[in-house]
Image (tube, grey):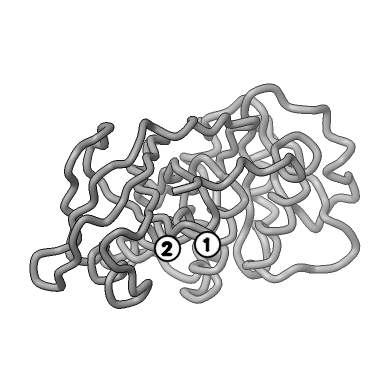
Amino acid sequence: MRVARVYTPQKLAPNARVVLEPAASHHVTAVLRARPGASLVLFDGDDRAIDARIKSADHRKGVIAVTAGEFLPPTAVVLETILGLAITRPNAMAEAIQKATELGVTCIQPLLTERAQARLVPPRLLSRWRQITIASCEQCGRNRLPELPEPQEFDEWIRNPGSPNRLLLSTRTREPLAAVPPPTGSIAVAVGPEGGFSAAEERDALARGFIAVSLGPRVLRAETAPVAGLAIIQSLWGDLGLAPLPESAG
């Protein structure tokens, strides 16, 4: 049976007493219906995870967990992946962020582009996106949350995307992603909104060292393109297909 995973921003330590935050407590008691004695894995988003066991459960006071062992082994990152994701429709953006987190991205940088669906991102929406990354990490087994900075203008981001290895998904080229030389250490990937990047944006990115690559003959939706691109990247050079770590015995 899979052990439930719960995120907490608290600093974790072996054999420590942890009182979970109200939202996490509600999730454990009301959604997971966990009871005292049940096993959990707590993780703090910085690649620290630890086995825990519920000592008491109280809707008003929160869940008290007592650690049952040492830290779990950290997760090695095969390829640091930075996703420059053009802001699109809310549902499509949420789905892309969720799937990108599951596919192991290190950073999701929302981008303001010529064809972006919004030019202003309210704090509540950015907070919602970050909550999506937390829920995705709880589900998929990641112990490190991806960074999700404030939105940035596309022309600013392409000057310093965080990696010398730079790709741009494009419908204007037939160059397959698999033809790109294997990156070392990290890679930055730019994915456009509905309608893709403008011709001027693509020219600017190429001038900044980006390589335009194709995902094939079909035109993919804005929420599908990052998933397809990241899956290919992780399959070619990352950890997709590697044997999973054994689950905690609790």
Q: Which amino acid does label 1 sit on?
A: Gln
Report which residue position mark 1 lands on.
98
In which image quadrant can residue 210 be found?
Answer: top right
Residue visible at 70% across and 61% down in the picture: 225
Q: Are marks 1 and 2 in contact (CB under 8 Å)?
A: yes
Question: Mark 2: few, some, or many residues within 10 Å (few <14, many ≥20)?
Answer: some
Residue visible at 24% across and 71% down in the picture: 26
Residue 107: x %, y % from top left: 49, 42
In which image quadrant can residue 211 be found?
Answer: top right
Report whether 35 appears left or right of 40.
Answer: left
Residue visible at 55% across and 61% down in the picture: 1
Q: What residue type is labelled 2?
A: Ile
User: 186 or 61, which lies in front?
Assistant: 61
User: 193 or 62, which lies in front?
Assistant: 62
Residue 142: x %, y % from top left: 50, 46
Report which residue position mark 2 lands on.
132
- Mark found first going from the N terminus, 1 or 2: 1
- Tell me how far mark 1 sits from mark 2, CA to CA: 6 Å
**Label 2 secondary element:** helix
